[in-house]
Image (cartoon, coloured by chain):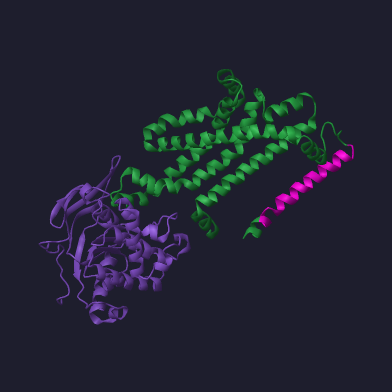
Chain colours: A green, B purple
Amino acid sequence: MTLKRLAGYGPAFVLAVAILLIWQLIVKGHLITATILPPPTAIVQALLDNWDVLSVHTLQTTMETVLGLGIATILGVVLAILLDLSPWIRRAVYPLLITSQTIPMVALAPLLIIWFGLDLSPKIIVVALYCFFPIAVAFADGLASTDPELMKLMQSMKATRWQALWLVRLPGAMPSFFSGLRIAATYSVTGAIVGEYVAAQQGLGIYMELAARSNVVVLVFAAIVVTAVLSLLLFGLVSLLERIALPWHQSQISKR
Amino acid sequence: MDDTQTDTPVAPVAQHARLSVEGVTKIYRSGKRTVEALSPVDLSVAPGEFVSLIGPSGCGKSTLFNIIAGVDTPTAGSLLLDGKLTNTNERAGKVGYMPQQPLLLPWRTVEENVMLGLDVRRVPRKEAQQQASALLKRFGLLEFANSYPADLSGGMRQRIALLRTVLFNSSFLLLDEPFGALDALTRFTLQMWLQDLWQSFHSSVIFITHDVREAILLSDRIYVLSARPASVLRTIEVDLPRPRRQEDLAQPQALRLEQELLSLLVKEQPL
């Protein structure tokens, strides 16, 4: 089972290695100057050499991301349940929710820094604003897609609204919730970096910005690698949580 | 005509019928159109009686079940439980209703699914668990107690759904075509299983089916319903000895009933 899953990543691994190899050859063949596009080996070297500085920034970004994602999860779940409570609330809130997503975060981030200062909170807010939407929408859809026959069954048992929600609809919407959370997790690191890019004392975003401004391309790439790894780790963590929380869902998927 | 049949469209209402349905109609309105699902339906179920409803598909049998189960409100007519007039709200929670699909919750184990009704009633967890596992043991399903529904066969899921219904309310069961989607052999096993279950709980049962032989095999009485809007065409008593076996369907009396039912239903079948 585990071997099979690992084998599933085989093609992606081969493709990635091939791209890196071509990249390395292009730069080594002097088709592009190494100061403009550093070769993968140089990026790894820079990453290792600067890890003591980079790790501090990584820790900062990780903290903002995790806190922001946590707040987004709570916000998303509460919002989804509110949307579900009555069609009136849904009709009132849903359009505003979608409009909120049209605001470019790059424009909002400086305002948040004016309002909340240079410390952690504006970054956490940016992450939360990025992430609550996919969670709220996926979870609300999950709640709305409860089998009406199942609701009839609950009604015949004289279940209250809250019992139907607690016993049937919430657990039934958990797979949708986790789909939303997975998407949110992949967005979250980017959110923190956008926040830091505008103004920050620490973090991968400000590190990238300073490196780019001093024309040290290789360090920008090193920070990008850390960002990607961080995003993948978060994605993996959410998938792991889902496996632990919904063991029944796995066996159902593998049967299909 | 022999003494196993009555040709009256309305059965005599017993003094203490478990359920009696009197002149119940249902009309759905959507915009300017109205759809009549039930024209006046009268039927009754005595305590411990097994009654089948048979009729063409889409004739409104499920609507009638929803009304009896307190999920839907009739347009007119009255329903009496144990001789007492009830409204929709009072009927909810009074019967064990089993829909066509087993509707097991995939995140609950078999045992947890069986105890769903007790959770709704707020029976303490431990007590509910004891009752569920006792029931599973009694019907030979204890080894599946910790399995998830996805790991079970179709026939097994129906058994679990039936036990869930029984644990919620064993005295009065509404079974909506529970074996409709099963293959013939599984179906037969489950019919016998249901007969055992019914006899050990002395339940009153209303059973919807399309299958004439199934109705004869299981029922004390069969109501033949007309095409939509449904009304009772005929009531047929099945006087075969109990417990019944598949072979009993080959008896002349059973064959005669089968022919009679089929000829009635063929006339009602929409082209």
Range of residues picked out in magenta: A6-30
Q: Residue furthest left?
A: B15
Give residue B24's position: percent from left, percent from top.
Answer: 19, 53
Specify whether A186 is left or right of A83: right
Q: Nearer the viewer, residue A140 or A213?
A: A213
**Residue shown at 32% from the left, 65% from the top:** B210
Image quadrant containing the C terminus of chain B? bottom left
Q: Measuring from the top left, give residue B174's x and y in whole percent.
A: 27, 60
Above or below residue B236? Residue A58 is: above
Q: Is residue B162 left or right of residue A188?
A: left
Q: In the rendered image, which quarter is residue B54 located in?
A: bottom left
Q: Residue at x 23, y 77 (%)?
A: B242
Q: Which secondary structure class fits the magenta region best?
A: helix
In this rendering, position of residue A83 left or right of residue B244:
right
Above or below residue A16? Residue B82 is below
Residue B57 percent location from the top left of the image? 32, 60
Q: Nearer the viewer, residue A154 or A195?
A: A195
Residue B77 placed where, x, y %?
16, 50
Return the residue nearer the eye: B34 or A199: A199
